[in-house]
Amino acid sequence: MTANDYIGRADEALRETYEPPMSLGEYVETIFENPTSAAHASKYLLEAIEAAGTRTVVEEGERKERYRFFDDPHNDGEHAILGNTEVLNAFVDDLRSIAARRGKEEKILWLDGPTATGKSELKRCLINGLREFSKTDEGRRYTVEWNIAGTDDSPGMTYGGKPAASEDDWYPSPVQAHPLSVFPESVREELLADLNESAEDHIPIHLETRLDPFSREAYDHLEERYRRQGTEDLFSAVADADHLRVKNYVVDVGQGIGVLHSEDDGTPKERLVGSWMAGMLQALDSRGRKNPQAFSYDGVLSQGNGLLTIVEDAAQHADLLQKLLNVPDEGTVKLDKAVGMDVDTQMIIISNPDLEAQLNQHAERQGSDPLKALKRRLDKREFHYLTNLSLEAELVRRELTNETEIWEADNYEELEEMIQEPITVSVRGDGAEVRERELSPHAVEAAALYAVGTRLDNESLPPGLDLVDKALIYDRGYLQDGDERRYKEDFDFADVEEGASGIPVTYTRDIIADLLHEKTDRHHAELAVEDVIMPRDVLNAMADGLDDAPVFSGSERTEYENRLVPIKNHVFGQQEADVVDAIMRDKKVDEETVEEYIEHVYAWVEDERIENDRGEYEEPDPLKMKVFEIEHLGRFDEDDYDGSDPDEGVAEFREEKVITALNRHAWRNRDEDFSVTDVDPREIPVIETVLGSHDWDDVGRTYEDLDPSQWADPPSGTQTEAIKEKTLRNMQEQFGYSAASAELTSRHVMSQVSYRWD
């Protein structure tokens, strides 16, 4: 594109964002067409979240509906909140109760949790999502602006003392006043009743806000002048398009969103609403009172009026929280003893666990606790560390790269591929050269699994399960046990809090970042193995670094070190499976053959016929099913059949292990376009084993002259040399290994296998 093309795109974006100012009457017509634009703060926030839709996720072994708003879709996922879906859903439920005024409207929403759990991402997500929603037709947000030029003895509307001299001198409400606040209260109530009746929404729009003090100055000035002139239609004169306009604005920090950061200082009143400007007070004709035009309106509530107020790192503003006590339910705050300002904003405070310690410092005083009223107003939701392997792997990748895309997959096998993928990172060395460092396949998986393993309860595991089993159940929703899948509900997991402690992602990130700059003691004549970081490198570094990390106590270090062995064993098993699959690649059964078998079994069980390639219907082929069950499944032999007819054991296998593993009801109620290809064969555990893997016994039977002890440097012309060449190539093509990481991984696996080969 040319430079003018980009400029044209920018023009188009702004045209879609902003509307020409409109009269108050035009605004009223607009909101009857789109009531969301007039919604009160909590309802508008709720509708912005709901407008993004939902998706289904598996967390802690359970399927949950998740609001896409928290995936930061408008910002390409850069500040997506990974996990904590249950907390976010509860947050939305709180908003729904507040918006509907079901007894929680006096609450301040409190989001608590340790560092690096997604609280700050929530803040950014809210800002990004509300900003972009306000640019849409459905989410337009409006306020008022005033021009009192042309009235007799007009002092002008100003922040700096210059009188308005022309039609162009319009002054917007500094706190995003709701346009309906211009109407007298009785008229506004009638208008809202009609609006809610026409909208037929389960949550009605509710507004009790009056004009802000700055806008009230303009309104009162205009009303007084026209009243003195004897104007009959007084409100129409004040709200005339020459004096009052309604304009849309893009919601952002400072305009509809107020954020109080940890480093912000000043008196409580300055931080809450702003401050008086002495020079302007003197310049304005205040007639013995403080003129609200001389107020800065830069406090967090002023900025967040109309939508959202966030107090970040709230422990730094504990003194301020008590000042907020009455704001949610009374909806008002004072600029001064005699000057009040109505506020419509959803208040959220974000903190680390240190705030709770401050709030509980007088807990032993019980009824005399001075903070009791504040604690009653706070509605707490706790963020935890991730306890899902796939989410933690996604987060680790985000921390190490610029990847922001949200991982979504149709089945767990696709997700598993993402978890196991390698990463290549460009690193500048001691000199000017830039090196490409590779985190080999399973390296990120290893780091993520170890971190998750430190966050799970290890004391009350059901019999027969270890920490890795639990992590896999939490991520997949099931555990493969031979031919059966055992789902989370099949296990008696203790109801304990998990994810409140453990290794944070920031620790993992820093350990891997250090590894990227360290030199490895590896050498190869042809391959850059020194640039490869293996899973065991990551795990060893994470365990070794525990002693020097000040964030862990002595007992935590000991506990986390004890959890390393099962993680290492699992990751080695993954590497081992890659090598075996690469060796046996050309021996695997193709999915078409598997699908054909399933289709014939379906028809055989249901006593139906199958449509062939010529469009003819024929009986299911008993020979095809028999051959598959003997040669590929390896479950039966000739003695289990009478010719091609199965005996009772085979028949039971087909019904119980194949058909019942899927949803038989779905098959019976399929439409005419249904095909077995609509069913993922991996949903059938016994079939998954056919598609998924071989073992070392299969390798030994297939390649009798293979010698794992010679793998590192196989003699020329041997079967071992040929198999190694093929295996390394397949590892690169199938699993994304580089030549160097394939060499290192296969050597490591074969060195262990050689001990038990005979």
Image (tube, rainbow, N blue to C red):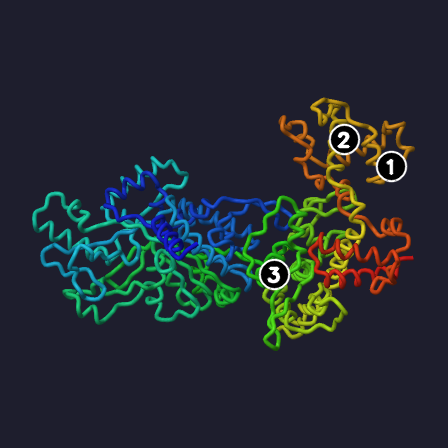
Query: Disc 1 on helix, strand or loop?
Result: loop
Q: Looking at the picture, which amino acid does disc 2 mark?
A: Val
Residue at numbered disc 3 = 396
| Res. 274 visible in picture | yes
Q: Residues within 10 Å of mark 3 (few under 14, many from 20)?
A: many
Q: Position of residue 696 (x, y in %)?
A: 85, 52
Q: Position of residue 7 (x, y in %)?
A: 37, 55
- Residue at position x 61%, y 63% in the image: 501
Between 405 and 506, the residue placed more toward the observer is 405
Q: Position of residue 189 (x, y in %)?
A: 28, 42
State the separation of the CA atoms marked 3 and 2.
43 Å
User: Which quadrant: the N terminus?
Assistant: bottom left
Q: Looking at the picture, which amino acid does disc 3 mark?
A: Val
Q: Quadrant of residue 623?
A: top right
Q: Looking at the picture, which amino acid does disc 1 mark?
A: Phe
- Residue at position x 74%, y 27% in the image: 603
Q: Residues within 10 Å of mark 1 (few under 14, many from 20)?
A: some
Residue at numbered disc 1 = 636
Q: Is residue 614 left or right of residue 242?
A: right
Residue at numbered disc 2 = 601
